[in-house]
Image (cartoon, helix red, strand yellow):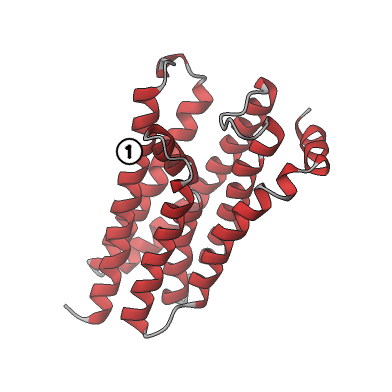
């Protein structure tokens, strides 16, 4: 197997790992919750389905590159735009629903601060996917950004998984660990860490810093009231 083939396989295996974390995260939440999934609003099911489709599409797209089926990969790639749009729309709607309920799923923060979690994730989704789309003719940058798009939206699954085993702070370590895996791959495959990977690492760290600093201010709370009330 050539170095390029081995590099491409890495993204396929990362897709599998992310999908497993998603299944474990949301699966554990269902097992520990007293809420009947069937009683949840249709919006929740649609968002969960489109979330799952994203990761399945990522894996399938990576496999197309592994099998050198680049034409289908390019054609199918445009469908990801639709997936991202639906993820953003349903995500914002769910965020609004959370605000209306006024109950934060995270005990240590109030509802206003909690809203920073999904909103920053949606912003990350938009930024990294846009960069992936803009660099689609630069294979190395494109596959970095598309993987980072998947990593920056992992928090809902990771947070549920770590909460279910009683160690919520481990969510950040797992999130960072996913980026570290890409850093290790970069060093092995290219001899240096790609600039997109550094951006992804900075995003994961600054995201948490934002949520527990600016996200905890009255200015942020007032902004949330303005947006969702």
Residue at image location 32% in from the left, 80% down from the top: 189
**Quarter containing the C terminus:** top right
Residue 226 screen position, x and y as percent: 82, 35
- Which residue is denoted by mark 1 in the rendering? 24
Residue 69 at least partly seen: no
Q: Position of residue 151 (x, y in %)?
A: 45, 55
Left-right relation of 10 to 26: left
Q: Give the quadrant of the N terminus.
A: bottom left
Q: Name the residue: 29% across, 60% down.
A: 12
For residue 203, side relative to residue 170 (left or right) = right
Q: Quadrant of residue 119?
A: top right
53 over 128 or under it: above or below:
above
In front here: 37 or 166?
166
Task: Describe residue 84's horizontal placement relative to residue 31 as left or right.
Answer: right
Name, please, the residue furthest toward the bottom.
191
Judge by depth and name the residue closer to the eye, 99 or 3. Answer: 99
Determine the secondary structure under disc 1. Answer: helix
Image position, residue 165 (x, y; %): 36, 35
Residue 194 appears in the picture as rendered = yes
Q: Residue at x 34, y 58 (%)?
A: 61
Farthest residue toward the left? 1
The residue depicted at 27 percent of the width and 79 percent of the height is 4
- Whole-percent x and y of residue 138? 46, 77
Residue 50 occupies which quadrant of the picture? Answer: top left
């Amino acid at each position: 197997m050539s170095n390029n083939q081995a590099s491409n396989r890495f993204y396929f295996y990362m897709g599998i790992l992310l999908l497993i974390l998603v299944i474990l995260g949301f699966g554990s939440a269902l097992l520990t919750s007293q809420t009947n999934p069937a009683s949840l609003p249709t919006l929740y099911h649609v968002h969960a389905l489109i979330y799952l489709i994203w990761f399945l599409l990522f894996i399938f797209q990576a496999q197309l590159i592994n099998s050198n089926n680049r034409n289908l990969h390019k054609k199918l790639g445009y469908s990801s735009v639709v997936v991202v749009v639906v993820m953003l729309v349903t995500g914002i709607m769910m965020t609004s629903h959370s605000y209306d309920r006024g109950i934060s799923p995270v005990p240590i923060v109030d509802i206003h601060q909690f809203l920073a979690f999904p909103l920053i994730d949606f912003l990350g989704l938009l930024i990294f996917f846009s960069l992936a789309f803009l660099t689609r003719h630069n294979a190395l940058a494109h596959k970095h950004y598309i993987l980072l798009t998947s990593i920056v939206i992992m928090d809902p699954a990771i947070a549920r998984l770590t909460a279910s085993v009683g160690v919520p702070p481990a969510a950040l370590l797992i999130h960072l660990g996913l980026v570290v895996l890409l850093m290790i791959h970069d060093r092995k495959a290219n001899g240096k860490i790609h600039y997109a990977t550094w951006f992804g690492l900075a995003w994961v760290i600054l995201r948490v810093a934002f949520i527990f600093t600016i996200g905890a201010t009255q200015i942020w709370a007032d902004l949330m009231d303005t947006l969702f009330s």
